[in-house]
């Protein structure tokens, strides 16, 4: 049984059929990536998994439990969190308070402090800016904060929506290195990316999404070698 | 000079009442982008609940500061519950509807509270008991403050300071800030946005109720429509400070109170109610985001 599996998911925004019978799964310990052009439905899929967007039909199973109709704020407590597209850090709160909000569902003060320090080790820039309002951080720093914040709930599965979006290439490299590290520490990662090159280089398996449908599914290395994928997503 | 200082004392006291009411407008707006037009009526309910509470505690015949405090707390608590009920029954069902629906609902709730109040309490004025007999304390030659004014000031400051500490330093307070920034991001943290919204209504309502009791302590005639004008002016105060901004509501309230008292004293009492709208027009022309507001386009 997969740790996370999406089965035959259909999602609509009014008349827009955004996901058409999508099935994907992630095994414990994997990095799985979901690539696809703008508007393919990647964000919709992650939002539906997290309970932010309702599914019309199909279901989302997490660790053997049907979470399709579980409200978003309860899903976090089950061990599945997300760093959303566009980062969505709480601009009006400090870096430290953002991390505290990431641990909102937890009560173990000592453990929270420990994890916060671990995040500061992973992302030293956040430590330097811990008292700063997060709205004043650079895009890359905000992205680090969004990822760190998502990890503060101690998830077993984390969804990352385009962590490279609008970020300087040097920082992207840093962030991807840390995604690998996070995965090495035992967190399953479902990574959505337009930067297919980077994503396929760290993932074990991948899916290609086109206009709401999964059109390809394979080991990451094979996808990276696939002619169609190379043409459409890897620039030749 | 002493006249001016005396006016200032009166203005600050009166302004702190506006500030308490304005806080509820601004907090609810911050979290829901909703102008809760029924908020002024909670101020009225607060005064009436205070009146009934004084009867329960037999505080009219046998007044004491402890009883006055009990009356204040009872009113705040019950008004918080009323705020919760209003949010759950009236606002929550229209939360996902177009903004106009929520606005119309708010106006409807306001009319309901006013006319319901008239039905239950009667349309005529009621007298709020003298819980604290008035004494005058001289501050300097020609400047004095009454003990009731002092109580208004002290209670307002304690409540506002408490609110600030709560919002800035507690887990729930930070969650309120998170929700006011983004419902979606907040729910991704495991924050129950519904609960935070309800809680915000409760806090706002209890502050308005406190204002109602504090005002009734000094000017004891209360009636079911008494919340309309102060509610409107406190709303202007919130806009003045930058709606959604908590310190802004306090400053806006003080500016409003001082302006009103000064206009009454130096121009004419006729213009007393007009100054609020003059301020509103000026701020909308000069600095639409308010004194503390950031000039950002509104989130949708
Ligand atoms: N809130 C929304 N309302 C209506 N349509 C939406 C909404 N969000 C996304 N869509 C549409 O759904 C489709 C998938 O969008 P999205 O999931 O954001 O794709 P991606 O993340 O792959 O770029 C697009 O056609 C987009 O226009
Ligand atoms: Mg997207």
Image (spheres, coloured by chain):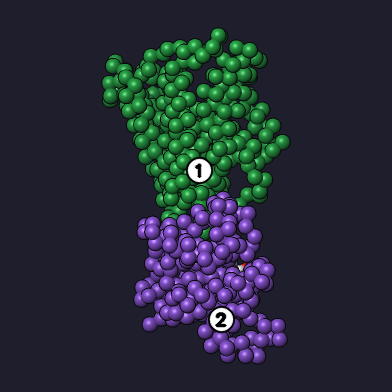
Chain colours: A purple, B green
- Cβ(mark 2) to ligand 2 < 8 Å? no
Q: In which quarter of the image is ligand 1?
A: bottom right
Q: Which of marks 1 and 2 is in front?
A: 2
Q: Which residue shows up at 38% across the image and 59% down it?
A: A110
* Same-chain check, marks 1 and 2: no
Disc 2 target residue: A202
Label 1 to label 2: alpha-carbon separation: 45 Å
Identify the residue shown where x is 62% and y is 74%: A173
Nearer the observer, A10 or A52: A52
Residue A127 sits in quarter: bottom right
Picture layout, residue A165 above or below residue B19: below
Whether residue B172 is situated above or below residue A235 in the rendered picture: above
The quadrant in which residue B1 appears is top right
Identified at 57% across, 88% down, the residue is A221
Does the rendering let one see residue A87?
no
Q: Which mark is residue B28?
A: 1
Is the residue marked by circle 1 packed among few (<14), some (14-19), or many (20+) residues within 10 Å? many
Q: Which subunit holds the residue at mark 2?
A: A
Q: Whole-percent x and y of residue A179?
A: 53, 74
Splitting the image into 4 quarters, where does residue B199 fall?
top left
> Given contact means CB atoms under 8 Å apart, are the residues at marks 1 and 2 in contact?
no
Mark 2 residue element: helix
**Mark 2 neighbour class, 10 Å CA radius: few under 14, some 14 to 19, many 20 or more:** some
Q: For numbered disc 1, what is the local secondary structure?
A: helix
Chain identifier of the residue bearing label 1 in the image: B
Looking at the figure, which quarter contains the N terminus of chain A? Answer: bottom left
Residue B207 position, x and y percent, is 44, 34
Image coordinates of residue A234 in percent, x first then y, are: 67, 83
In this view of the protein, can residue A161 be seen by the observer? yes
- Is residue B66 placed above or below A5 in the rendered structure? above
């Amino acid at each position: 049984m997969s740790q996370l599996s999406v089965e035959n998911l259909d999602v609509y925004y009014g008349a827009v059929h955004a996901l058409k019978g999508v099935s994907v799964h992630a095994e414990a310990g994997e990095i799985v990536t979901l690539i696809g052009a703008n508007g393919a439905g990647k964000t919709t899929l992650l939002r539906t998994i997290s309970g932010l967007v309702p599914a019309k039909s199909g279901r989302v199973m997490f660790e053997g439990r049907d979470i399709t109709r579980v409200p978003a704020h309860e899903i976090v407590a089950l061990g599945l969190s997300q760093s959303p597209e566009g980062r969505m850090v709480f601009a009006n709160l400090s870096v430290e308070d953002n991390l505290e909000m990431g641990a909102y569902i937890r009560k173990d003060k000592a453990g929270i402090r420990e994890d916060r320090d671990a995040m500061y080790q992973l992302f030293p820039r956040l430590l330097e800016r811990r008292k700063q309002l997060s709205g004043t951080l650079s895009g890359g720093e905000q992205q680090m904060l969004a990822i760190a914040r998502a990890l503060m709930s101690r998830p077993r599965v984390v969804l990352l929506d385009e962590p490279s979006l609008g970020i300087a290439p040097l920082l992207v490299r840093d962030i991807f290195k840390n995604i690998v590290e996070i995965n090495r520490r035992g967190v399953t990662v479902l990574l959505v990316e337009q930067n297919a090159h980077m994503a396929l280089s760290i993932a074990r398996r991948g899916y290609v999404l086109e206009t709401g449908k999964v059109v390809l599914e394979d080991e990451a290395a094979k996808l990276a070698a696939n002619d169609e994928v190379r043409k459409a997503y890897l620039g030749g | 000079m002493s006249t001016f200082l005396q006016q200032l004392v009166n203005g600050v006291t009166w302004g702190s009442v506006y500030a308490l009411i304005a806080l509820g407008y601004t907090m609810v707006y911050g979290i829901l982008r909703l102008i809760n037009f029924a908020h002024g009526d909670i101020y009225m309910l607060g005064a009436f609940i205070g009146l009934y509470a004084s009867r329960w505690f037999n505080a009219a015949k046998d007044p004491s500061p402890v009883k006055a405090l009990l009356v204040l707390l009872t009113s705040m608590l019950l008004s918080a519950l009323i705020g919760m009920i209003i949010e759950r029954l009236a606002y929550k069902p229209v939360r996902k509807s177009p903004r106009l629906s929520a606005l119309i609902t708010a106006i409807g709730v306001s009319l309901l509270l006013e006319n319901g109040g008239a039905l239950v309490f009667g349309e005529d004025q009621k007298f709020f008991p003298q819980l604290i007999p008035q004494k005058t304390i001289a501050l300097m030659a020609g400047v004095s403050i009454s003990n009731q004014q002092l109580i208004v000031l002290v209670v307002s400051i304690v409540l506002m300071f408490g609110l600030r500490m709560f919002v800035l330093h507690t887990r729930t307070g930070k969650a309120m800030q998170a929700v006011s920034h983004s419902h979606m991001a907040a729910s991704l943290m495991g924050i129950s946005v519904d609960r935070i919204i309800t809680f915000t209504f409760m806090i706002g309502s209890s502050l308005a109720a406190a204002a109602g009791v504090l005002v009734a302590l000094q000017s004891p005639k209360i009636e079911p429509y008494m919340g309309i004008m102060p509610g409107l002016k406190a709303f202007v105060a919130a806009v003045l400070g930058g709606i959604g901004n908590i310190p802004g509501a306090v400053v806006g309230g003080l500016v409003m109170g001082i302006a009103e008292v000064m206009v009454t004293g130096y121009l004419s009492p006729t213009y007393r109610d007009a100054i609020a709208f003059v301020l509103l027009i000026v701020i909308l022309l000069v600095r639409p985001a308010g004194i503390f507001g950031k000039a950002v386009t509104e989130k949708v």
